[in-house]
Amino acid sequence: MKITFVGSEATPFAKTGGLADVLGSLPKTLAQMGHEVSLIMPKHQAIKTQYEKALTTVYTGTIKVHHDDKYIGIQRLSQGGVNVYFIDNEYYFGLRPHLYGDYDDGERYGYFAHGVIRTLQEVLPSQAIVHLNDWQTGLIPYLMKYDRKYRDLQSVKTIFTIHNIAYQGRFSKALMSHLNTDYSDLLEFDDVINFLKTGIMTADQVTTVSPTYKDNLQYAYFAYGMQGVLKMRGESFSGIINGIDLETFNPATDDAIQKPYDASKMVSGKKANKKALMEQFGLKNANLPLVGMVSRITESKGFNLVADVIPPMVEKGLINFVLLGSGDPYYEDTFQDFHDQMPDHLGVYFGYSDGLARQVYAGSDLFLMPSRFEPCGLSQLIAMRYGTLPVVHKTGGLKDTVEPFNEYTLEGTGFGFDTFDAEDLKQALLLAISVHGESDTFKMLQKRAMAQDFSWTQSANDYVKLYHEVMKRG
């Protein structure tokens, strides 16, 4: 099957979040299964800097934006069996240090949409499926289905995946003069142009990144206004859980951690990595459970709860705590103050380091993810891969991937709480701490977590099944 993925970021080329991890792994897995897989993305500044010598130009031309003809180059390289195509335009992408956040993002990604269409016409004809991702690609199925210039693509089936519905691509209707297409109310929501809504309404199938998040999005609390639009899609809306790259995240071969280990050497491996992590952060008393977090530091990730619950537990000598991440200055300042008050038992690192993140996964006993909502989440999957038991709010993909510990049957792969409040989080942590004290049970849970199969293979098979179903619709 010929499958083309489209997105704004993908590892190893450019990354701001989990979307990049998905587009770095899922296409590669499908290619390994024998499918002919391509990926189209913008040629961001980071790509220009790191990969220029590896790129081959396969097309040049122009695209009309407003009254101007804008240059387009299409460049290609092969990565992991996937042909990756970059839309090259210095003004829109090559000179920008950021992937998003510029005043003209609507124009930039409107241009990108036409660039993807041009790639499908000139370089990648006869695709069976075009798999689009997040608001940056939301204009594309509209152009393919309704723009008279692109009638040759009307029969190509499109899948549109929502990775995080909070980001919608909302722009003034003045943007229409730059989009080089006819107006339709399919482009509009709440009196503005909304690329996410356009993708939802015009793709042949809409998916999101876990079954529970798909159910969550039927309600206003989670859907950021899109619940009614999604309900209109009915059976054409489904949820498929993400996976992780098991080669990339493998404690047995990870050279970023102090001592690699597998399940058979988990006890000694975890002990050595915990010791190294505590030394890195200047923490004392290795007998205490070490709770780790690697996260964007925002309220949606549950930091209002963390600020209420973690410091008193640290102060009482129940846990040690390490935090790696960046985000809201208020919470960064708050946790810096906590560190200053309790430097021997609470460590912080504001920013991001992939190597240090892996050390947190490997060296912690428990991994905290109390997100208010979580479309899928990858960190809990990585933590379990490294034998670190997640403590999660039972929402979205966290609910789908972490089986809460049952103290009667001893089943489970982590710990969970139902209500998004401090007391529920506290009780889940207290249960986790008590089980940590029962070393045999805790080790059993760790080995069970490490044995979970979170590879992309199952998810890829689910997507292939869905692709075939969509193609049969005619």
Image (cartoon, grey):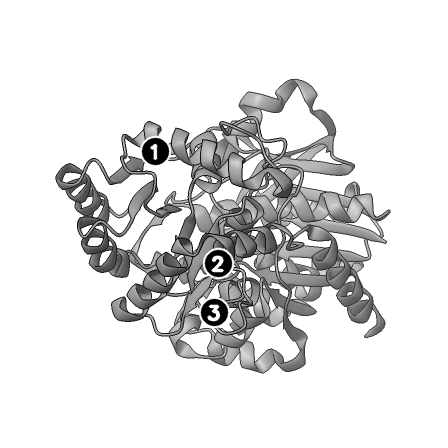
Q: CA distance from mark 1 to mark 2?
A: 54 Å
Q: Name the residue at 64% across, 37% down.
A: 62
Of marks 1 and 2, the one in the foreground = 1
Tell me the SS state at disc 2. Answer: helix
Tell me the SS state at disc 3. Answer: strand
Of marks 1 and 3, the one in the foreground = 1
Task: Please state the horizontal and vertical placement of residue 207, each as a whole percent of the image.
Answer: 62, 66
Task: Please state the horizontal and vertical placement of residue 94, each as a whole percent of the image.
Answer: 51, 30
Q: Name the residue at 73% across, 61% down.
A: 463
Q: CA distance from mark 2 to mark 3?
A: 10 Å
Which amino acid, mark 3? Glu
Of marks 2 and 3, the one in the foreground = 3
Task: Please state the horizontal and vertical placement of residue 85, each as a whole percent of the image.
Answer: 69, 37
Q: Is residue 275 left or right of residue 33?
A: left
Task: In this rendered view, identify the residue nearer to me: 393 or 1.
Answer: 393
Task: In this rendered view, identify the residue nearer to me: 460 or 105.
Answer: 460
Q: Name the residue at 54% across, 72% down.
A: 409
The relative height of residue 187 versus residue 98 in the rendered view (above or below) is below
Q: Which residue is mark 3?
A: 188
Q: Name the residue at 42% across, 51% down.
A: 367
Q: Is residue 256 left or right of residue 157?
A: left
| Quadrant where the image shows the C terminus | bottom right
